Amino acid sequence: MEDKRHNYWDIFFKGFTSILFTITVFGGILQFTWQQKNLKILEFAKMYTIDSLKFEQTIVEKRLEVYFSIGESIGIILSHDKNDSAFRKYIDDFEKLYYGEGLLIEDLSVNRSMKDFRTVILDYVNDRDISKFQVNDIGMTLIDSLKLSLLKRKSVYRLP
């Protein structure tokens, strides 16, 4: 009798430990699978964040190029007289920026200043009671709005 009882407990503990071992192994497999799934999700989220930051950085670099081109164009226009033979070419270059890359700028103050400068410079060329001083003033206002726009974004995009 004692031998049967001992045999029963022996079989019970061996079966129980086998079942417990199997449950533990499957639990470990499930936990590993869940961690791998979460790791993939985190990796994709990180890749998305990095890609979006790279995209924003390229937009900022393009904006800097456009601002530089606009500033250079304004400087050339302001430094020449309207009677200069190449003056109309400089205005055409500004209008190319105005209708081309300038449209990519999403800053309303810069867009408004560009529009004002374009209107004033065309009035100045067509002799519509606009003085060189007014042209210079509007041009400097546009340059100031370019600077302010860059300063606003400097902290956001960590510009140099």
Image: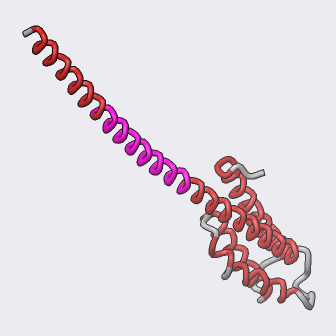
Q: Is residue 30 above or below residue 126?
A: above
Q: Residue furthest left?
A: 1
Residue 14 found in image quarter: top left
In the image, taking residue 45 as reference, residue 159 lies left or right, namely right
Q: Residue at x 44, y 46 (%)?
A: 36
Residue 30 is inside the magenta segment:
yes
Examine the residues drawn in magenta and state their main secondary structure.
helix
Q: Residue at x 92, y 91 (%)?
A: 85
x and y percentages locating residue 148 in the rendered image: 71, 55
Task: Report the quarter where the N terminus lies.
Answer: top left
Q: Residue furthest top?
A: 2
Q: Residue furthest bottom?
A: 85
x and y percentages locating residue 111 in the rendered image: 64, 70
Check the image and tell me how it is coloured.
secondary structure
Q: Is residue 52 above or below residue 31?
A: below
Q: Nearer the viewer, residue 135 or 10?
A: 10
In the image, taking residue 7 as reference, residue 40 lies left or right, namely right
x and y percentages locating residue 11 in the rendered image: 18, 22
Q: Is residue 21 above or below residue 156?
A: above
Q: Which residues are magenta?
A: 23-48
Q: Is residue 106 visible?
A: yes
Q: Is residue 152 visible?
A: no
Residue 120 found in image quarter: bottom right
Q: Nearer the viewer, residue 152 or 50?
A: 50
Q: Nearer the viewer, residue 154 or 70?
A: 154
Residue 99 is inside the magenta segment:
no
